[in-house]
Amino acid sequence: MTGRVVPGVVGALVVVGIAVVGANPFPAGAGAGATVYASGNSQKNSSYSQANVTVAVGDSVTWTARSGDHTATSYGGTFDSDAIAADSQPHSYTFQFTRPGIYRYYCREIPGMVGQVTVNDPSGPPPTYEPSTTTTTRPLYHRSAVAVGGQG
């Protein structure tokens, strides 16, 4: 009787193991992360919903526009989305964090709209702030090159 029970138990454990490993909806190496919603169209009514999030190294954060035009731009230049808008494409921007740190960010479209992403590495020291940069920001919208001028 013992000979039949052991293969049955092993078979059940293999099925459970496959189910647990296959349960992760993210590609290998990609973490779950968080979603931040951007709303509003003026300084008075704009905000990031869940503006301060904490994720692990390898996780992604997705910023999604619910209303208005927005960006997600880190003060240190680690990430900088193009404009995301609720009424046109793209509606969202995703960034995968590969290094621990504390990343403060803002919307280039709406002054005063700010947030923070804290990225933890369970096996490392506490995260530190990303240094701010003083470089100029790029244009919000990418325009196609247009030939200007003539012969003269």
Image: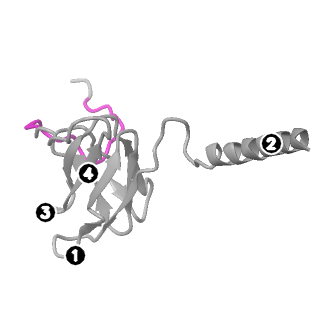
Asked if the residue under mark 3 is in contact with the one under mark 4, i.e. CB atoms within 8 Å, the reply is no
Which one is in front, 34 or 64? Answer: 34
* Few, some or many residues within 10 Å of mark 3 (<14, 14–19, 20+): some
Q: What is the magenta range?
A: 133-149
Which disc, if any, is residue 117?
4
Task: Give the residue number, with chain letter if any, for mark 2.
Answer: 11
Which one is in front, 82 or 32? Answer: 32
Q: Secondary structure at mark 4?
A: strand
The label nearer to you, 2 versus 3, is 2
Which one is in front, 150 or 98? Answer: 98
Alpha-carbon distance for marks 2 and 3? 58 Å
Q: Amino acid at mark 2?
A: Gly
Predominant SS of the magenta segment: loop
Task: Give the residue number, with chain letter if any, for mark 1.
Answer: 45
The label nearer to you, 1 versus 2, is 2
* Residue 113 in the image, given as x and y percentages of width and height: 18, 62
* Residue 27 in the image, given as x and y percentages of width and height: 56, 40
Q: Earlier in the sequence, mark 1 or mark 2?
A: 2
Q: Amino acid at mark 1?
A: Asn
- Is 87 rendered above or below residue 135? below
The label nearer to you, 1 versus 4, is 4
* Few, some or many residues within 10 Å of mark 2 (<14, 14–19, 20+): few
Residue at the spot 84% in from the left edge and 39% down from the top edge: 7
The label nearer to you, 4 versus 3, is 4
Task: Give the residue number, with chain letter if any, for mark 3.
Answer: 112
Q: Residue furthest top?
A: 151
Residue at the spot 20% in from the left edge and 41% down from the top edge: 127
